[in-house]
Amino acid sequence: MSENFRAIVVKKNHDQFDIDINERMISDLPDGELLVRVEYSSLNYKDALSASGARGVTKNYPHTPGIDAAGVVEESNEKDFPIGSSVIVTGFDLGMNTSGGFSEYIRIPSQWAIQCPDGLSTKESMMLGTAGLTAGLAVDSIKNTFDIKDAKVVVSGATGGVGSIGVNLLSHLGAKVTAITGKIDEKRFLKKLGATEIIERDHFIKATKLPLNKGVYNAALDVVGGSMLSSILSSMYQNGIITVCGNVGGPKFETTVFPFILRGNSLVGIDSANSPIDKRKMIWKHFSSDWKLDGLEKYSKIVDLENLIPEIKNILAGKQTGRIILKL
Ligand SMILES: NC(=O)c1ccc[n+]([C@@H]2O[C@H](COP(=O)([O-])OP(=O)(O)OC[C@H]3O[C@@H](n4cnc5c(N)ncnc54)[C@H](OP(=O)(O)O)[C@@H]3O)[C@@H](O)[C@H]2O)c1
């Protein structure tokens, strides 16, 4: 193992944040039981926030973002993670205030890692990444409420990371999926993922009467928040479940008690970063077996460290379609 490795490094330069590729030293990495040689990482919206100075995500710079990593253990003090084993690490503090996965090496506490399950490669695990885990947690909540087969489920931000895997997984499980998107020219992509109906974002919001519209959906996976969430809440049938994980459209939303007390709807928050390890193992096991998604490769763009930098700017501008995978 070489003492030097390459990583993305974000530096604060007055009010600006400059992104570059630097040589770093293994000895600079934080303490932790596992040293992992990263094979793949993936780009999530939170990484772009970290790379652009969002204080709610990262406080101290220089910093290496990357909330996801999958690779091979090279040093270990834990018998559950022998040297040479493949691991998946997503969330907790990785890439926030702990040096992250946009790097050839990470060092982490063993409690953040899970063994890559049989039937799932490190590359496939990062084609899913935090986006997949989040969509998986949302789908698990929906499944615990009613039978997903033939249910009408609406997904917002449908062409993005969480949204596209949500559409793919829900249709794989037999749901009738309505995809809401700002990129109406990506209709073919959404149809291929399995969406049965596609609605343009602004049209959906303008056509919805608040606080109660006609009930149309049994369940929702919302990554947008803001007025999108207000409209989704008003469009649910009786006893619907609305899973909420994101705020790309804003954190505030408008509603009343009526979707809850007249229709028995439930609003469920999804927090993948701090989800318990047993739940993660269960979701990743599903992804390696009965939730194994066809064609992940088709919806993923593989980039190296150099080509990741423009993608960080793209995702921040809401322009991402599918998943960006970093190969190290
Ligand atoms: N709670 C958790 O555990 C968790 C985990 C992962 C992500 N998240 C959050 O979920 C959200 C999505 O993350 P992601 O990684 O999937 O990001 P992403 O790949 O950028 O996808 C977000 C999608 O939302 C839509 N969008 C973007 N800007 C918008 C705007 N201003 N108004 C309305 N829609 C907009 C776009 O899709 P269309 O063009 O198709 O509409 C975009 O592709 C983020 O807020 C992220 O922080 C939360």
Image (cartoon, grey):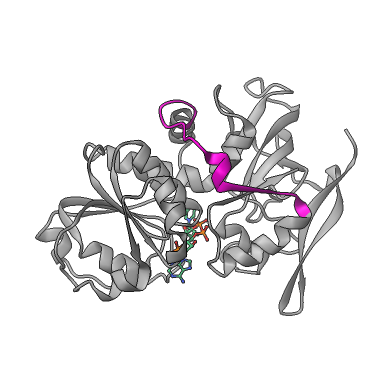
Foreground pick, 64 / 303? 303
Q: Residue at x 46, y 43 (%)?
A: 275
Identify whether 221 is placed above or below 11: above
Residue 113: name its quadrant: top right
Foreground pick, 279 / 120? 120
Where does residue 148 sit, x and y in percent of width and height?
A: 26, 39
Where does residue 192 sit, x and y in percent of width and height?
A: 43, 47
Where does residue 272 sit, x and y in percent of width and height?
A: 47, 47
Q: Residue at x 47, y 28 (%)?
A: 285
Q: Report the magenta residues as a range.
A: 287-305
Q: Residue at x 73, y 42 (%)?
A: 106
As for residue 8 lying within the magenta part, the answer is no
Q: Residue at x 53, y 57 (%)?
A: 321
As for residue 291 lying within the magenta part, the answer is yes
Left or right: residue 217 compared with residue 116: left
Give the farthest residue toward the bottom.
15
Left or right: residue 178 compared with residue 41: left
Q: In which quadrant of the rendered image does the C terminus lie?
A: top right
Give the farthest residue toward the left.
262
Q: In which quadrant of the rendered image does the N terminus lie?
A: top right
Q: Is residue 58 visible?
A: no
Q: Is residue 20 visible?
A: yes
Where does residue 222 sit, x and y in percent of width and height?
A: 36, 58
